[in-house]
Image: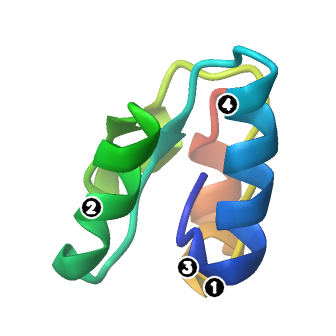
Amino acid sequence: MAGPGRVGAGLAQLLAAEGAARTVTDVDPAERRFSDELGAVRAAPDGIHAADVDIAVPVALGFFLTRQGAAAVKA
C-alpha cells in the first residue's frame, strides 16, 4: 500500500483483521507509526513497486501511476 492516509489506513485495518500481510510506504517518515501499529512491513517509497505482493493499492501517491512506475509493479 502506497501512501496510506485515511482511505488506505481503513483498508489496511480491514485487511489486518482478516489476517492479510501488508506492506506499506509513505513519503512522510512520521507515518511510520502506522505500519508499526498494524505490524505491517515498511518499504521505501522508491522501492514499493518491487514489493512481493498480490495486490497493489496506490492510494495518495501519484508517482505510482506513471508509465514507468506501473511497469515496475510486481503485483
Front residue of this view, candidates 71 and 29: 29
Which amino acid type is shown beneath numbered disc 2? Answer: Arg
- Seen at 59% across and 19% down, the residue is 21
- Seen at 25% across and 53% down, the residue is 44
> What whole-number distance in Å separates the C-alpha atoms at marks 3 and 4?
26 Å
The percent coordinates of residue 53 (x first, y second) are 63, 22
Q: Residues within 10 Å of mark 4 (few under 14, many from 20)?
A: some
Of the numbered discs in the image, which one, if any, rests on residue 47? none
* Circle 2 or circle 3, nearest the eye: 2
Q: Mark 3 points at which residue?
A: 63
Asked if residue 30 lies left or right of residue 65, the reply is: left
Q: Mark 4 points at which residue?
A: 16
Which structural element holds mark 3? helix
Q: Mark 1 points at which residue?
A: 62
Sequence-wise, which precedes: disc 3 or disc 4? 4
Sequence-wise, which precedes: disc 2 or disc 4? 4
Sequence-wise, which precedes: disc 2 or disc 3? 2
Sequence-wise, which precedes: disc 1 or disc 4? 4
Which amino acid type is shown beneath numbered disc 4? Answer: Ala
Which amino acid type is shown beneath numbered disc 3? Answer: Phe
> What whole-number distance in Å separates the C-alpha atoms at marks 2 and 4?
15 Å
User: Relative to 12, does residue 17 appear above or below in the rendering?
Assistant: above
Q: Mark 2 points at which residue?
A: 33
> What whole-number distance in Å separates the C-alpha atoms at marks 1 and 4?
25 Å
> What whole-number distance in Å separates the C-alpha atoms at marks 2 and 3?
22 Å
Front residue of this view, candidates 60 and 36: 36
Splitting the image into 4 quarters, where does residue 26 fall? bottom left
